[in-house]
Image (cartoon, helix red, strand yellow):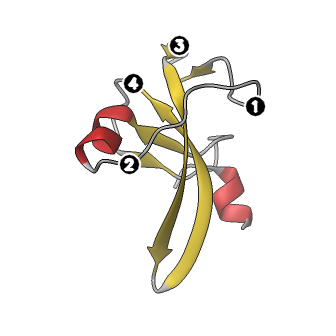
Amino acid sequence: MDTGAVKNCLNASFARRLHIPITPPSDKTPPALSGVDGKSLTVIGTTQLAFSIAGYMCYAEFVVVEDMFHNVILGLGALRH
């Protein structure tokens, strides 16, 4: 979890490895995101996922990003949910 992340993010290579469907970018997809170091991240689309934290099922939208260090980042929206 990252309280500084405004979006939930998913590493693109991780998504491909798990055969998670990726929806191409649309008008709702953020055109650009930047990492904590200020570098631009390449957004390739979005996906909807269900996941469990300590037995609690959650559903969220993720922005799929190329070359992200972590496989998954849960942002502020996931914390609020």
Point out the residue furthest to the top here. Answer: 39
Decide: marks 3, 2 in contact (CB < 8 A)? no
Instruction: Name which residue type carries label 3.
Output: Ser
Of circles 4 and 1, the one toward us is: 1
Residue indicated by mark 4: 66
Q: Residue at x 49, y 24 (%)?
A: 44
Decide: marks 4, 2 in contact (CB < 8 A)? no
Is residue 9 something that shows in the picture? yes
Instruction: Name which residue type carries label 1.
Output: Lys
Residue indicated by mark 3: 40
Residue 20: numbered disc = 2
| Tally of numbered discs | 4
Cα distance, mark 3 to mark 2?
Answer: 23 Å
Horizontal and vertical percent position of residue 7: 64, 41
Instruction: Name which residue type carries label 2.
Output: Ile
Is residue 35 something that shows in the picture? no
Point out the residue furthest to the left here. Answer: 17
Of circles 3 and 1, the one toward us is: 1
Q: Earlier in the sequence, mark 3 or mark 4?
A: 3
Cα distance, mark 3 to mark 4?
Answer: 10 Å
| Image height of 39 relative to 49, above or below | above
Residue 28: numbered disc = 1
| Image height of 45 relative to 7, above or below | above
Horizontal and vertical percent position of residue 58: 58, 71
Cα distance, mark 3 to mark 1?
Answer: 18 Å
Q: Residues within 10 Å of mark 4 (few under 14, many from 20)?
A: some
Q: Residue at x 52, y 55 (%)?
A: 1
Give the secondary structure at mark 3.
Answer: strand
Point out the residue furthest to the bottom here. Answer: 55
Q: Earlier in the sequence, mark 3 or mark 1?
A: 1
Q: Residue at x 27, y 50 (%)?
A: 18
Cα distance, mark 2 to mark 1?
Answer: 19 Å
